[in-house]
Image (cartoon, coloured by chain):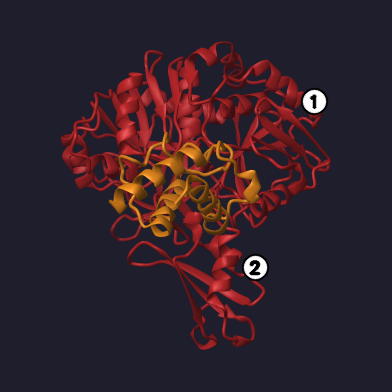
Amino acid sequence: MTGAAGTILDSTRDLARRVSGSDEAPPQYGQLVEGYAHLALEPGSAVLIVSSNSVEFLFHWIAVLANGYVPCAIAPSSRTSLITALQGSLQIAAIAGPHVDPAKYRARGAGRIGAFTAAVWPPVPPVYDPFDVLILTTGTSGSQTACVHTVESLVCNASMTNRALGITASDRQLVVLPMYHTYGLVTQSIGSIISGGELVIDGPPFNAARFVERVRQEGISICGITPTIARDLLNRTTALPHLRSMSIGGDQLTADEVTRALAQPLAEELWVTYGLTEAGPRVSVLPAHSAPVDTYDSVGRAFDGVATRIDSPDAEGIGQLLVKTPSVCCRKVGNGITRQPFTADGFLETGDLFSKDADGYLRYRARKADLVIVKGEKLNTRSIDVVAELHPDVEFARTTESHTHSLVTSVWAKDDKTLDLDDIKTFMKSRLRLHEVPEQIIQQRADVFHK
Amino acid sequence: MTIAAIEDTLRDVLIEDLFVELDKDQILPGSSLRCDVGLDSLGFVELREQIAQRFGIVISDDDFTPENFATLSSLSSLIAQRCEASAR
């Protein structure tokens, strides 16, 4: 066991005191560890945890690790079809969650662990190591890929974030972002665990008024949010309670929005961050409250110990951002992964186009073609195409983002027949999460097909 | 509209529009929409929009709270109040 894993496991001694949420009863950590041990999985077996934000979720995640298994958190709204596909693609051994129905998964065994039900699939040879952690990439339904991290890489990243943002044991952090994503899980939850601070876990629906109330009532000193939530808060007319520190990441914030956030102010210290799951996730940070105004359009500079490089920059200095970080994932896994996103000299290929000025400030220019942000959620349009192409009448599908930032899927029929677009939409809705369903589906004829 | 009728309509919304993978009789008045039904943040936003369409009422930001959207029962009570207010 590494020192980082020991830190996480040891934290359970006083974690119940430091973490609070809306759970009816605090989970008994020892019983959870015992419950997972009874599953008798091979060390390195992956366990899907299907749960919304809760203290219970966090304790299950740690209890899975404590047994030498590999946790993989996933959104509670995930369809059975996605979970079944993930099981094959990522060699998952078991699934646990508050409402897991073993019959749906043809489980070979099942049992209660705390407030969760666990179901065990037929044995698969473990392809991971104890204290590995699986983190789904975009979490998009058609994509069954994940990053293999280690507890050490995630603790390393959370620690870099804590250091850069000055987060200490005296802080009380509010988690409103999903804990099945890296921001909520690593930056906030693991960050609070290792800092010795307190963690208040909240869940959906997000409501600006409630957020303000929670910050005030709970005496919150730090929180992390997305630009979507930040815009919601900026549109409020009433004053926000005092927050020592707020970090914003997950999507781009404009220079104007940073200026407004500082003027309101959203917090005493405002940190604009950039990261990606593969990197663990955080890479760079802009301390907007103390940074020069002409850097408000940037995501700041890389953390200490993280190297960045612009690959093959064009005449304007724009090229793919490459990152070398001690918190990088070991590898990517899942069906469709044909190559690992690393250069020969160990830099991670982010797929994002950036420029970097002489002072090291990184400016985001464009996203990899297949990734779009819809309703504040990052998703891969190719994975939506994959789902559309599962429909028996669809030959090809191509999903794009419209000028109104909604999804439009063009579909080409097998044999060029006329498609029942309502039927295709129903088919897609049953397999995708709500924000992934295209607003519009358009049939294209063979003569307008562009592969 | 009775509370029972509102609850039944909400079950339809959850299953037909939000594709919740539960049978109608598994969604009880006391079922937690977050923990038992499995709605995430976007699911709650979609549910709010569907309620507006099905019941012809607007759920304001002030009403869009975890307390009102906690269970089928609490949400039905909110809808009943808003329907009554809009009928006046």
Identify residue type, mark 1: His
Q: Position of residue A246 (x, y in %)?
A: 31, 30
Query: Would residue A157 be found to the left or right of residue A31 on screen?
Result: left
Chain letter for mark 2: A
Query: Would residue A82 be found to the left or right of residue A19 on screen?
Result: right
Q: Position of residue A196 (x, y in %)?
A: 46, 14
Q: Position of residue A392 (x, y in %)?
A: 67, 74
Looking at the picture, do discs 2 and 1 lie on one chain? yes
Instruction: Tell me how far mark 2 sits from mark 1, CA to CA.
Output: 38 Å
Q: Residue A339, relative to residue A259: is it above or below? A: below
Q: Mark 2 sits on what residue?
A: A390
Tell me the crowding category of disc 2: few under 14, some 14 to 19, or many 20 or more residues within 10 angstroms, Cα based: some
Query: Would residue A353 be found to the left or right of residue A435 on screen?
Result: left
The secondary element bearing badge 2 is classed as loop
Tell me the crowding category of disc 1: few under 14, some 14 to 19, or many 20 or more residues within 10 angstroms, Cα based: few
Q: Mark 1 sits on what residue?
A: A38
The secondary element bearing badge 1 is classed as helix
Chain letter for mark 1: A
Residue A245, by quadrant, is top left
Q: Is residue A111 visible?
A: yes
Which shade is chain B? Answer: orange
Q: Residue at x 60, y 64 (%)?
A: A387
Q: Residue at x 68, y 28 (%)?
A: A64
